[in-house]
Amino acid sequence: MRAIKRSLLMALVLGLFAIIGFRIWKPFRPQSRPFDKADVIVVLGGFSKDRVAEAVRLFEHGHAPKILVTGDEGGIVKDLLAKGIPEKAIIHENAARSTCENAEFSRPMLDAMGAKRAIIVTSWYHAGRALRIFQHLVPGDEFTIAYVPECDSSEKENDAKMAAREKFAIAHTLLFRFVPCLW
């Protein structure tokens, strides 16, 4: 009986956070543009081709002198090098496996380089959650988003799936990362 009550309570709490996540913390397209000058461009791992192109564009336009790649097993770094980004401009953190870990594991690196302003490069559906996580887990620094826009070609179906998945990731992040006192 006690286990059933606990399961029902957990389901209720998860449902509540899902509703909050869907209504309040839903994916968004930021209206602001990236900083003209930042200390570093932070590229989140995943779907490297589009994120690489955006990071290269920002770097070549002089938005920041360094690129921090986080949560990638080397694909983004290789692509950046292939696009002509100097190796000395790239910092690589490859241990992160989630957006929260991207922020947590980047923090000491950002502190070590004295970075106070960063441009986060990610996908459009992930922009809102990524920005909020970095703002929460790396206090004192300023972040802005440069996101890869919604695809209009063969990747459109994958983008739609990832956008739907992002809603569950929002609820999971709220429940398990930002409200740990429940457990």
Image (spheres, grey):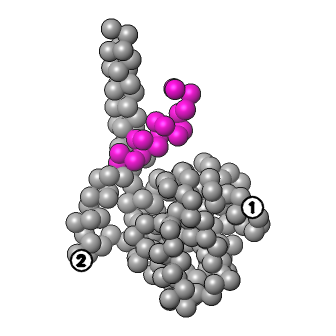
Indicate the amino acid at tag 1: Asp
Q: Is residue 52 magenta?
A: no
Q: Mark 1 to mark 2: distance in Å?
A: 39 Å
Q: Is residue 182 magenta?
A: yes
Indicate the amino acid at tag 2: Ser
Q: Is residue 155 left or right of residue 59?
A: left
Q: Which residue in the protein does label 1 denote?
A: 111
Q: Are marks 1 and 2 in contact (CB under 8 Å)?
A: no
Describe the element under mark 2 as helix, strand or loop.
loop
Which residue is painted at 38% across and 25% down in the image? Answer: 10
- Counting residues from the start of the chain, the first of labels 1 and 2 encountered is 1
Q: Which mark is residue 153?
A: 2
Crowding at mark 2 (Cα within 10 Å: few <14, some 14-19, many 20+): few
Q: Position of residue 144 (x, y in %)?
A: 57, 64
Which residue is painted at 39% across and 65% down in the image? Answer: 124
Q: Start and end of the magenta stretch?
A: 167-183
Crowding at mark 1 (Cα within 10 Å: few <14, some 14-19, many 20+): few
Describe the element under mark 1 as helix, strand or loop.
helix
Figure quadrant of residue 160: bottom left
Is residue 41 shown above or below 22?
Answer: below
